[in-house]
Image (tube, rainbow, N blue to C red):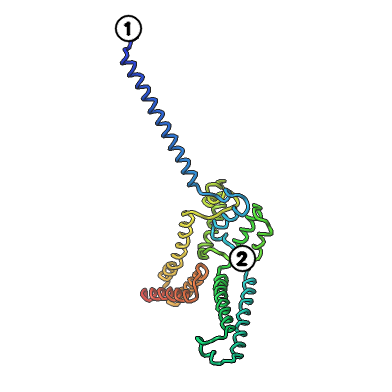
Amino acid sequence: MDPSNGSTPGPSTRSYTSHAKRFRHNVSSRYIAIRDKLSNKILQHAHESRRHQIEDFPRGYPRFSRLFVAHPSFAISRKFLAMRARLLFVKQDHLSMLEERLDEIDHSEPRKMFLGNLRRDRNYSRKNVLDSMDKALRDYDQFVSRFRITLDASNAHRRDIVSLQNWIKGTGSINQAEASFLRDEEDLMSIRSRPDEAQSFFETCVVKAGVKISRIFQKYRKFPSQGLSRDPRVHISEGPFIRRLIQSLVAFIVVLLLFVPIVIITSVKSQSTRILIIVASTAIFILSMSGMTRAHTRELFIAGATYATVLVVFVAGNG
C-alpha cells in the first residue's frame, strides 16, 4: 500500500519497477563481463610482453645459451687454431701432390701437340687431375678464407672469460669437462662485435659502481643490471640509461682532451711554455685515441696531426 493515501500500487507501477531492476541487472552483468575481459587481456599482454630472464629457462645448455647471447662479452668460443693449421697443411699437401702428378703427366706425354691444344687433348689422366685440382683449390680457398676470418677475430678478454667461468662454477649448469674450453684462454675469441675499449672500460666501472650502491641501499632488484637475471651475483648492463650514461662519460672525456689544453694555453703567456703544452697535449691525445679506440696507425697519425695543427693555429692567432 501507498503510505500517503493507503492505496495499493497498480500493475503498471509494478511492471515499471521490475523492468528497471532487470535493466540494472543486465547493465551490471555486462559491466562485470567487460571489466573481467579487459583485465584478462591486460594480464595476458603483460605476461606476454614480460622480458624473459635467464633463470626462466631450464638449467643446463638452455640457460647457458641465453646467457651466451645476453651480452656481447659472453659470446666466447674457441678458434681451434692448431686444428685449422693442421687441416690447412693437409689440403696444401694434397694440392702439391696433384701438382706433381700433373707435371709427371706433362713430361711423359707421348703426343706433345696435346700440350698446346686443349680442344684436341685426349689424355684423360690429365683431365682427371685437372678436375681434381679444381675441386681441391675451391675447397682450399674457402678454408683459407674462413681461417683468415678466425685469425682476425678479436681475442676474448680475460675479464669476460673469468665471468663465464665463475657463472658455470656458481650455477653448476654445465658439465665441468664440457666447460673446459674456457681454460685455453689464448685460443678463445669474441664472436660478437664489442664496443671500443673506452666504452667497455666505462661500462665495467658503471656496473661495479651500481652494484656497490645497490648493496648499500639493499635494492638489488631495482638496479638496471638485474633486468636480464634474477641472480644477485649476475650483473649485466643493459637498457638506455646505462648506454646514455656511458656515452655521456665518453663525451665528457673527449671534451676535456680537446678544450682543456686550449684553456691552459690561453692563460699562459710564454711562447716556449705554449709549445711544450702543445707537444704534451698532442701526445696525451694520441695515447688516449690508441687506448680508447681501435684506430689504425694511419688514423692515429692523421688525428694527431690535425689536433696539433689546430692548437698551433690557435696559438698563432692569439699571439
List x then y, in percent, for residue 72. Answer: 54, 60
What residue appears at the point 49 percent right and 74 percent down from the top-left corner? 296
Can residue 215 be seen here? The reply is no
What is the spatial separation of the Cα atoms under label 2 and label 1, in whole angstroms?
Answer: 99 Å
List x then y, in percent, for residue 98. Answer: 61, 82
Quadrant hosting residue 179:
bottom right
What residue appears at the point 37 percent right and 73 percent down from the top-left corner? 318
Q: Give the number of the disc on residue 6.
A: 1
Q: Earlier in the sequence, mark 2 or mark 1?
A: 1
Element under label 1? loop
Element under label 2? strand
Q: Are marks 2 and 1 in contact (CB under 8 Å)?
A: no
List x then y, in percent, for residue 122. Answer: 55, 86
Q: Nearer the viewer, residue 69 or 83?
A: 83
Q: Which residue is mark 2?
A: 78
Q: Amino acid at mark 2?
A: Arg
Q: Give the number of the disc on residue 31.
A: none
**279 over 41 or under it: above or below:** below
